[in-house]
């Protein structure tokens, strides 16, 4: 599903954000990306989403080398990738329903499809009763559920998320994690960047540790 071969990313002037990264993430895996601030985690996620391209090496998504992708194909790639990033904000003066339908409309879904999909993801995230509420009135946990609902509304193959439990209390954080595990079990490959050691330890999933641009650990937890 996702492969990186000898990937390097150097930012101007000489910041080596990733150095010789090699990885294979299979369809349906749940992977934690951990490591200190500045280690290269966001760069890793941005490469998959093709927000940036590698300085050297190959990023292959579903058999396609995405550095070589023609610009006109980028929207098709992104349709298969849902993202929950902190800088990807909700439309606060719009309702929960509108926040989800907006993206579906943008990719040309019919009104019928939009109604069906919004209903499905609201149900999955336990937000049906908030359908007509403006997103600014939701609690922190509900806003995060809405961000996830919006990201999975068009049923992407891959979900990328950067610290989705940041600023949430432990119980709500674990509730969000359970929802992500559920989405994962339904077949979506998930990569989650996180600093939350408690959650990473409790989840017992594959852990990829990045430090100074290099993968220094790649272990499957929970299998003994
Ligand atoms: P993390 O997500 O683990 O905090 P990043 O991938 O954001 O790490 O950053 C890796 C390194 O690359 C850091 O030294 C950071 O300052 C640098 N960096 C990230 N984005 C840019 C950019 N657009 N221009 C220059 N340097 C960048």
Image (cartoon, grey):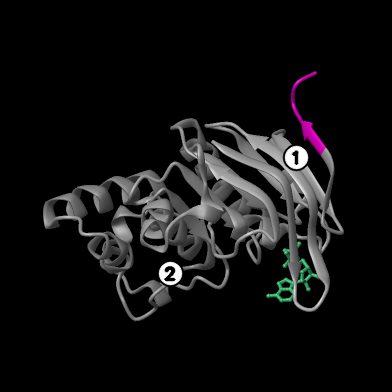
Is residue 164 at all visible to an observer of this figure?
Answer: no
Dot 1: element: strand
Q: Is 44 part of what is drawn in magenta? A: no
Is the residue 67 above or below the residue 135 in the image?
above
Look at discs 2 and 1 and give the one toward the viewer: 1
Q: Earlier in the sequence, mark 2 or mark 1?
A: 2
Ligand 1 within 8 angstroms of badge 1 C-beta: no
Dot 2: element: loop
Quarter the C terminus occupies? top right
Where residue 194 appears, as percent x and y from the top left, is 71, 54
The dot on residue 156 is none
Q: Is residue 1 left or right of residue 10?
A: left
The dot on residue 138 is 2
Give the farthest residue toward the bottom: 93
Give the farthest residue toward the top: 224
Q: Residue at x 76, y 30 (%)?
A: 221
The dot on residue 207 is 1
Where residue 14 appears, as percent x and y from the top left, is 83, 73
Quarter the N terminus occupies? top right
Where residue 13 appears, as percent x and y from the top left, is 79, 78
- Looking at the rendering, the quadrant in which ligand 1 lies is bottom right
- The one of 23 and 160 positioned closer to us in this rendering: 23
Where residue 30 appears, as percent x and y from the top left, is 61, 37
The answer for how far apart the CA atoms under marks 2 and 1 are is: 32 Å
Q: Residue at x 30, y 57 (%)?
A: 129
Which span of residues is magenta-colored?
Answer: 218-224
């Amino acid at each position: 599903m996702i492969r990186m071969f000898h990937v390097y990313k150097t930012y101007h002037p000489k910041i080596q954000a990733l150095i010789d990264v090699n990885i294979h993430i299979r369809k349906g895996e749940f992977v934690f990306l951990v490591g200190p601030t500045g280690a290269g985690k966001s760069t890793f996620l941005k490469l998959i989403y093709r927000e940036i391209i590698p300085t050297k090496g190959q990023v292959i998504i579903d058999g396609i080398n995405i550095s070589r992708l023609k610009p006109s194909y980028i929207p098709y790639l992104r349709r298969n990738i849902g993202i929950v990033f902190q800088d990807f904000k909700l439309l606060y003066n719009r309702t929960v329903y509108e926040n989800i339908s907006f993206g579906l409309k943008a990719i040309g879904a019919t009104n019928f499809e939009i109604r069906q999909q919004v209903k499905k993801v609201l149900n999955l995230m336990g937000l049906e009763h908030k359908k007509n509420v403006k997103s600014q009135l939701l609690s922190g946990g509900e806003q995060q559920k809405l961000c996830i609902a919006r990201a999975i509304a068009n049923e992407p193959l891959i979900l990328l998320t950067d610290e989705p439990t940041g600023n949430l209390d432990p119980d709500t954080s674990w509730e969000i994690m359970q929802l992500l595990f559920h989405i994962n079990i339904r077949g979506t490959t998930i990569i989650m960047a996180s600093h939350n050691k408690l959650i990473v330890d409790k989840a017992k999933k594959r852990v990829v540790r990045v430090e100074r641009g290099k993968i220094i650990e790649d272990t499957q937890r929970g299998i003994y």
